[in-house]
């Protein structure tokens, strides 16, 4: 899990979605110019007056050491102020900090609680994080059904790691009834976004005929795409598969891989 750090796009979004607050526009302009010291001077009085977005930005500046010395304790304090006012990204970042013991005492239960607060508001990274916690039983009682419920919510928001996790669980019957068509659906959606682990899994499904018809050329193509991202299992599987294929079929699969492009979706980054 990584904290939410897509600051530049977020500053633009904040400015567009909030009423004009004295100092915020100046802070935004300074931040975009990488004059972090000036940005801090503009955001700090707003944050002290309870402006939730300025509080979150100060948390991120302390988190990254931008305009101020890096200080995880102060980052957590500002995130906490914003999180208590319902700011989703601050809630998620607090969840990460409690999980890692960064700026706060490590506490899995508090980590899960903050992820839950953000996830219930639709925060995709928190939904994925909760899915992992319910699989691991970390900070919560292990529960395969709840894990897959949260994975599904994140997968429906195009989180490629959640799509793969949900697909694999359908493939293996892990906490959910085994369903090969649904496994193929979610693994494919992840693979089509360029996730090398999903591409590897989809290549194996084509090789073994799991949930779809066996197809050596398509198997090779997906394994080749994963191999180009240095997935070691895909490299081994591709090379083993090549020994069973005709040279012209390998050439055709390589051509398909070269022509392939990932699906680009309008969404926040998945970490």
Image (spheres, rainbow, N blue to C red):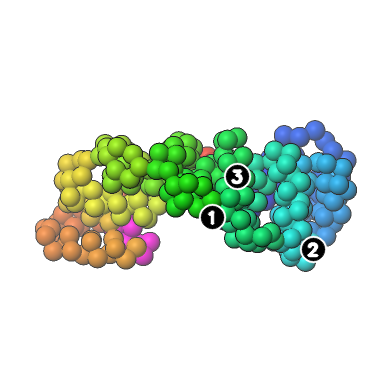
> Residue 182 at what x, y percent from top left?
31, 37
Q: Quadrant of residue 188?
A: top left
> Residue 3 at what x, y percent from top left?
61, 54
Q: Nearer the viewer, mark 3 or mark 2?
A: 3
Q: Secondary structure at mark 3?
A: helix
- The residue labelled by disc 1 is 1
Do the residues bearing badges 3 and 1 touch, measured as CB atoms within 8 Å?
no
- Per the model, the C-alpha gap separating discs 3 and 2 is 29 Å
Q: Nearer the viewer, mark 2 or mark 1?
A: 1
Judged left or right of residue 247, residue 130 is: right
Using a 10 Å C-alpha cutoff, classify the residue at mark 3 as few (fewer than 14 neighbours), some (14 to 19) or many (20 or more): some
The residue shown at (44%, 39%) is: 146
> Residue 233 at what x, y percent from top left?
29, 63
Q: Name the one closer to the observer, 177 or 39.
A: 177
Q: Secondary structure at mark 1?
A: loop
Q: Name the one closer to the observer, 257 or 125.
A: 125
Q: Quadrant of the N terminus?
A: bottom right
Judged left or right of residue 199, residue 238 is: left
Q: Which residues are magenta?
A: 224-230
Q: Residue furthest front?
A: 141
Judged left or right of residue 225, residue 216 is: left
Q: Is residue 172 magenta?
A: no
The residue shown at (11%, 60%) is: 244
- Per the model, the C-alpha gap separating discs 3 and 1 is 15 Å
- The residue labelled by disc 2 is 68
> Which of the two labelled residues, at mark 2 and mark 1, occupies the earlier sequence position?
1
> Which of the two labelled residues, at mark 3 and mark 2, occupies the earlier sequence position?
2
Using a 10 Å C-alpha cutoff, classify the residue at mark 2 as few (fewer than 14 neighbours), some (14 to 19) or many (20 or more): some
């Amino acid at each position: 899990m990584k904290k939410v750090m897509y600051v530049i796009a977020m500053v633009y979004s904040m400015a567009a979605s909030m009423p004009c607050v004295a100092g915020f526009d100046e802070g935004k302009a300074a931040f975009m110019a990488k004059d972090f010291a000036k940005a801090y001077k503009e955001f700090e009085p707003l944050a002290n007056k309870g402006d939730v977005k300025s509080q979150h930005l100060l948390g991120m500046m302390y988190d990254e050491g931008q305009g101020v010395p890096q200080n995880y304790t102060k980052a957590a304090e500002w995130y906490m102020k914003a999180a208590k006012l319902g700011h989703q990204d601050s809630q998620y970042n607090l969840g990460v900090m409690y999980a890692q013991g960064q700026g706060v005492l490590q506490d899995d239960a508090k980590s899960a609680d903050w992820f839950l607060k953000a996830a219930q508001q639709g925060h995709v990274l928190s939904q994925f994080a909760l899915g992992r916690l319910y699989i691991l039983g970390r900070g919560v009682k292990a529960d395969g059904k709840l894990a897959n419920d949260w994975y599904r919510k994140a997968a429906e928001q195009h989180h490629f790691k959640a799509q793969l996790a949900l697909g694999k669980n359908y493939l293996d019957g892990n906490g959910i009834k085994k369903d090969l068509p649904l496994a193929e659906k979610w693994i494919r959606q992840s693979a089509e976004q360029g996730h090398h682990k999903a591409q590897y899994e989809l290549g194996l499904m084509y090789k073994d005929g799991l949930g779809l018809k066996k197809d050596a050329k398509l198997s090779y193509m997906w394994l080749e795409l994963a191999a180009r991202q240095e997935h070691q299992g895909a490299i081994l599987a591709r090379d083993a598969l090549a020994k069973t294929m005709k040279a012209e079929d390998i050439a055709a699969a390589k051509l398909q891989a070269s022509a392939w492009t990932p699906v680009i979706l309008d969404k926040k980054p998945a970490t």
